[in-house]
Image: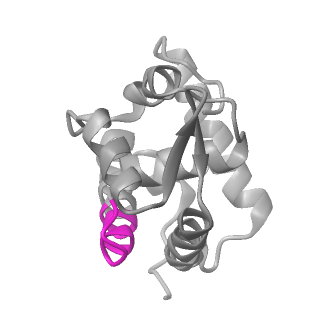
Amino acid sequence: MDIKPYPQERLAAQAIGYWSREAANLVITGLRTALAEEHLTQPHWWILNHVAGAPGAWTRATLTGKLTRFDDQNTDFEAVYDDLTTRGWLTTTGGTLALTIEGEAGRLRAHDRNAAVHARIRHGIDTPTYAATIDTLRRMVANLGGDADLP
């Protein structure tokens, strides 16, 4: 999609709050819509990814502690764990979480849906520009006293 070009001075005078909120809202809506096609929420996705990335490392309590800071929906994480367990996607062995074969297959389907959204987001934006944008936003977060570490 082509967008109208503007002079750098005009762009620099734009309100970062407006554009960052607008981008965040559209990104979150796009990702949540894609996940809903798999009957998943973002917290489902977060759990699936974290468990897949570190099998046997997470308990419900430690993973909930890690994910709570990203949650803007007052998620009942216990209900999400229970849902994934009922689906046959998640098991608990010795207190730690693991994905089942079905869970990994579901995670991969959701990953493909999210990847399509990310491709739309990054259309026409090369990797150096994207990385510079993320780093600029991290700097803004740090300048305002927030946590600029990568999640």
What is the count of numbered marks? 0
Q: Can residue 14 be seen by looking at this rendering? A: no
In the rendered image, residue 61, in percent from the top left (x then y), is placed at: 45, 20
The rendered magenta stretch, by its main secondary structure, is classed as helix
Q: Residue furthest right?
A: 128
**Along the viewing direction, whichever of 93 and 16 lies nearer the viewer:** 93
In the rendered image, residue 66, in percent from the top left (x then y), is placed at: 50, 25
Residue shown at the point (61%, 65%) measured from the top left: 104
Is 34 located above or below residue 79 in the figure? below
Q: In which quarter of the image is residue 39?
A: bottom left
Q: Can residue 65 be seen by looking at this rendering? A: yes
Is 12 located above or below residue 64 in the figure? below
Q: Residue furthest top?
A: 145
Q: Which residue lies furthest to the front in this view?
A: 94
Q: Give the range drawn in magenta.
A: 29-40
Residue shown at the point (50%, 77%) measured from the top left: 113
Q: Is residue 34 rendered magenta in the image?
A: yes
Q: As drawn, is 4 to the left or to the right of 40?
A: right
In the rendered image, residue 44, in percent from the top left (x then y), is placed at: 40, 52
Residue shown at the point (25%, 41%) measured from the top left: 79
Q: Is residue 119 rendered magenta in the image?
A: no
Quadrant for the C terminus in the image: top right
In the rendered image, residue 107, in percent from the top left (x then y), is placed at: 55, 65
Is 82 located above or below residue 40 in the figure? above
**Along the viewing direction, whichever of 28 and 74 lies nearer the viewer:** 74
**Along the viewing direction, whichever of 28 and 2 lies nearer the viewer:** 28
Residue shown at the point (35%, 57%) measured from the top left: 28
Q: As drawn, is 130 to the left or to the right of 7?
A: right
Is 44 located above or below residue 78 in the figure? below
